[in-house]
Image: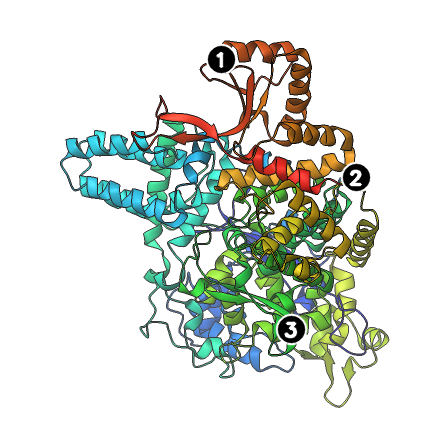
């Protein structure tokens, strides 16, 4: 890695990966029940001397004393207090050693990392295998190309029932209301509670709620469990379970999906104010310049080790295990390994290396996605990798959450920052999770340009959410974000255990290196020195007094750094080792020769500056490279260079801009056209022609194209309208977005078929109805066949319905014409011919509704909206 010594070009570190068995904290390996912490030990120059002396010796491990015993013996010899032999880090010897080491010339270790070294705060590095392969992963050649539709459908298929119901459910209040109703029912008698909750379960359409209520009923069936105890069980995990599994098809989940949700529930119980900070402890030996060491405890009370046992987790673990056992028995849930005991903390130590990140970028760039789709995917990837934001935090980003961008006080400012606040789609875990993310400093230049372009586009289209399409009233579904990452990793890597949450571990671990100004950042991240300095300035802007670790915790949304170290920083031991290794140690030449067997001539030959004749001391830092060459293996770590990946990414971006394929649409960016027509429609009809150039430029549409679009809209609609109102509802928006994407692709690949579809619609359309009619003659049947064939390519067949005088007549014509079997059938009394429409499922809410059943299918207006929009869009001639 780059040297800190100006006279050297390269600096080397020896890393000894250690695996420590720990019953209470660590990560699991190969489905083993044991937990292990991984400590990346970096020997200092004095330790390197002893390693050199022992390198050819055969050691009798039976004669090696345990570390605890050694510390105890030395403490007795020096008459230093050592109250607990099993906790040597609390001995006066270690405290004095820590103090004196930090006074050595060149020593950089700060208060927080000395606490890590002593073991007073738990943290783990990457497992040894992952550390060795970090930045050296094998990338599969020629992966299957990415398709836009699979980002919505690949992992989980939401059931139609859940989708229909989700339109009427308020995201944050759903879980709260269910839990409230259950707990109110549990105040009744046991029989009344069973009756009430059974009704709740019958009415609940969400599969997550059905599973929870089923568990509650099973608990009620056990008369040995009191009702108030069941209420506590539900209150412990119920709301978090419902929130984290909202709108998911849990029947399709695998074991790791359950594990990820359970992990988040467990972590939510130990966040922020629920425990005291180890890093807030004061010590008379701590450096007074360290903000971490001198901050008082949050509560001002003396810390007790009992506060760190996390007994509250024992209850949570037990409820989750009991709940999952019930799901396994009654819902065929997959096996989930529960390694936690009374205070066991299981951490998933994962980091996505720069090599993998840039391979993911290249994969997206090389795909056949539309330019706007690529842009959106790349920005989601950059946000996850650079900021460590949680998936729901990214999903819930509103356009108005982005500050310091646009025309402000007479100047154009483009230094975007995301202000995270709770909203309907983003439930923050605590008040400390409200924070500012400095995008302008964290992103690379190309990433920042893409982010700014997306912001302006979404603002121009008047979309509420940054990652949305269509009307922009709802963000893209969560499955889009998780699927995107999983699909890319599966296709690029031979094996992996990454989840979306791995990005959070990655960003925080890498930023720890950046904020510490360690040369490790240049081999474990893709940040250069200048970029690193900008990041430090941005993150520490409001945390200069408290220091870098509180700055990093603040960026992550944690109240104190304890949680950050325990769960997310996997570079702490590497960093503390590097900081300790910077101490300038010296040893008398006679002692040095007795220990190592290396004489003056060898020392002088390696570095003439190593021996000081006046003090007769050998400066061990000058012998650092020689000793490493003798004791370490020749295999290097973190050898990846990201320059080529960045260059390739920029070249792909430029190529995409040139290789845009022609479309039969007047203007290829459909949402810009919709926004243009919506804005013109709100202008007085007498002023529309005059304002047209101004509005066109604002939406990035050439004036001649805008005039064509406007003239066609005026021809289609004889009143003041230029565009129909889009169908409302989350499901309809999802269908509309997919249909417009497919229509655009068809306008390039099969323009003749799309023109035929629009031609048939034009001849059949009627503004007073949302369906179109076909006769029974042969020519009409052929027309129906052509129309439905293309229609099912634009909108999934299950959303179409054909009605005739009887359902059997529809089944006959479907079979005769070879139409998709998923097309719904319906009957309309005394109707002559065939009626075609796009439908949605509705529920009868009033007796005034003439529907014969409680649930029925009615026209959604989708066909009418899409048909008229395509008439306006398609270029004539």
Figure quadrant of residue 794 = top right
Figure quadrant of residue 388 = bottom right
Q: Is residue 304 left or right of residue 70?
A: left
Name the element at disc 2: loop
Residue 182 visible in rendering: yes
Figure quadrant of residue 332 = top left
Q: How many residues crowd around disc 3 within 10 Å: few (fewer than 14), some, or many (20 or more)?
A: few
Identify the residue position indicated by label 1 in the image: 807
Where is the C terminus found, in terms of image quarters? top right
Is residue 371 shown above or below 803? below
Give the number of the mark in front: 2 or 3.
3
Identify the residue position indicated by label 3 in the image: 413
In the image, residue 695 lies at what x, y percent? 66, 60
Identify the residue position indicated by label 2 in the image: 141
Is residue 415 shown above or below 708? below
Name the element at disc 1: helix
Instruction: Measure how far apart labels 3 and 1 are at the Cα level.
Output: 62 Å
In the image, residue 96 lies at what x, y percent? 49, 77
Q: Is residue 270 left or right of residue 863?
A: left
């Amino acid at each position: 890695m780059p040297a800190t010594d100006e006279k050297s070009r390269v600096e080397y570190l020896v890393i000894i990966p250690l695996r420590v068995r720990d019953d209470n904290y660590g990560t699991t390996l190969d489905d083993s029940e044991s937990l292990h912490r991984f400590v990346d030990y970096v020997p200092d120059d004095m330790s390197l001397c002893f390693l050199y002396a022992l390198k050819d010796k055969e050691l009798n491990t039976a004669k090696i004393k345990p570390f605890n015993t050694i510390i105890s013996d030395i403490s007795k010899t020096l008459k230093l207090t050592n109250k607990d032999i099993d906790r040597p880090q609390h001995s006066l010897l270690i405290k004095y050693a820590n103090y004196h080491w930090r006074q050595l010339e060149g020593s950089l270790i700060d208060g927080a990392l000395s606490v890590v070294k002593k073991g007073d705060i738990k943290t783990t590095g990457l497992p040894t295998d992952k550390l060795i392969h970090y930045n050296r992963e094998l990338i599969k050649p020629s992966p299957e190309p990415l398709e836009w539709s699979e980002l919505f459908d690949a992992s989980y298929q939401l059931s139609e029932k859940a989708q229909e119901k989700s339109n009427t459910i308020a995201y944050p209040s759903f879980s709260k209301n269910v839990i409230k109703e259950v707990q109110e029912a549990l105040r009744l008698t046991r029989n009344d509670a069973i009756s009430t909750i059974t009704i709740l379960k019958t009415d609940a359409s969400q599969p997550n709620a059905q599973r929870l209520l089923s568990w509650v009923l099973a608990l009620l069936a056990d008369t040995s469990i009191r009702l108030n105890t069941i209420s506590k069980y539900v209150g412990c995990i119920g709301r978090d379970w419902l929130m984290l599994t909202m709108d998911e098809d849990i029947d399709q989940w695998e074991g790791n999906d359950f594990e990820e949700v359970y992990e988040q529930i467990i972590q939510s119980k130990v966040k922020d104010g629920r425990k005291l900070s180890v890093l807030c402890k004061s010590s008379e030996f701590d450096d007074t310049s360290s903000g971490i060491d001198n901050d008082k405890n949050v509560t001002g009370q003396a810390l007790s080790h009992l506060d760190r046992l996390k007994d509250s987790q024992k209850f949570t673990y037990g409820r989750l295990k009991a709940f999952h056992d019930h799901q396994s028995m009654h819902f065929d849930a997959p096996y989930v390994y529960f390694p936690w005991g009374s205070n066991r903390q299981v951490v998933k130590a994962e980091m996505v290396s720069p090599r993998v990140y840039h391979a993911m970028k290249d994969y997206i760039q090389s795909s056949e996605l539309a330019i706007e789709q690529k842009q959106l995917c790349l920005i989601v990837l950059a946000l996850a990798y650079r900021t460590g934001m949680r998936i729901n935090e990214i999903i819930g980003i509103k356009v108005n959450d982005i500050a310091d961008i646009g025309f402000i006080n007479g100047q154009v400012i483009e230094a975007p920052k995301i202000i995270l606040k709770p909203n309907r789609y983003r439930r923050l875990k605590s008040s400390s999770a409200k924070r500012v993310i400095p995008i302008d400093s964290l992103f690379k230049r190309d990433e920042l340009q893409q982010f700014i372009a997306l912001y302006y586009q979404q603002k121009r289209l008047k979309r509420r959410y940054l990652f949305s399409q269509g009307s922009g009233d709802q963000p893209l579904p969560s499955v889009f974000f998780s699927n995107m990452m999983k699909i890319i990793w599966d296709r690029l890597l031979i094996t992996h255990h990454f989840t979306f949450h791995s990005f959070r571990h990655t960003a925080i671990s890498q930023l720890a290196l950046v904020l510490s100004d360690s040369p490790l950042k240049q081999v474990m991240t893709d940040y250069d020195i200048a970029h690193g300095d900008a990041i430090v300035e941005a993150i520490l802007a409001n945390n200069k007094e408290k220091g870098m670790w509180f700055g990093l915790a603040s960026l992550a949304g944690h109240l104190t750094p304890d949680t950050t170290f325990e769960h997310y920083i996997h570079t702490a031991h590497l960093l503390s080792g590097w900081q300790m290794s910077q101490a300038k140690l010296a040893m008398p030449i006679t002692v040095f020769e007795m220990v190592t067997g290396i004489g003056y001539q060898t020392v002088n030959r390696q570095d003439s500056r190593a021996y000081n004749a006046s003090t007769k001391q050998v400066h061990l830092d000058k012998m650092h490279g020689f000793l490493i060459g003798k004791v370490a293996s020749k295999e290097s770590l973190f050898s990846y260079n990201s320059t080529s990946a960045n260059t390739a990414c920029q070249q792909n971006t430029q190529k995409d801009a040139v290789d845009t394929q022609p479309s039969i649409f007047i203007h290829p960016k459909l949402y810009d056209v919709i926004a243009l027509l919506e804005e013109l429609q709100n202008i007085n009809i007498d002023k529309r022609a005059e304002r047209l150039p101004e509005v066109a430029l604002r939406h990035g549409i050439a004036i001649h194209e805008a005039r064509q679009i406007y003239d066609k809209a005026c021809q289609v609609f004889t009143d003041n309208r230029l565009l129909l109102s889009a169908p409302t509802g989350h499901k309809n928006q999802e269908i509309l977005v997919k249909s417009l994407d497919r229509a655009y692709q068809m306008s390039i690949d099969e323009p003749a078929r799309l023109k035929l579809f629009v031609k048939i619609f034009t001849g059949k359309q009627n503004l007073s109805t949302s369906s179109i009619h076909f006769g029974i003659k042969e020519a009409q049947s052929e027309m129906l066949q052509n129309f439905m064939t293309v229609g099912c390519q634009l909108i999934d067949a299950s959303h179409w319905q054909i009605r005739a005088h009887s359902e059997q007549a529809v089944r006959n014509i479907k079979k005769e014409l070879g139409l998709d079997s998923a097309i719904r059938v319906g009957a309309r009394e005394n109707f002559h011919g065939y009626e075609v429409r796009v439908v949605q499922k509705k529920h009868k809410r009033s007796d005034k509704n003439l529907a014969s059943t409680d649930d029925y299918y009615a026209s959604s207006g989708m066909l009418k909206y899409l048909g008229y929009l395509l008439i306006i869009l398609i270029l004539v001639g």
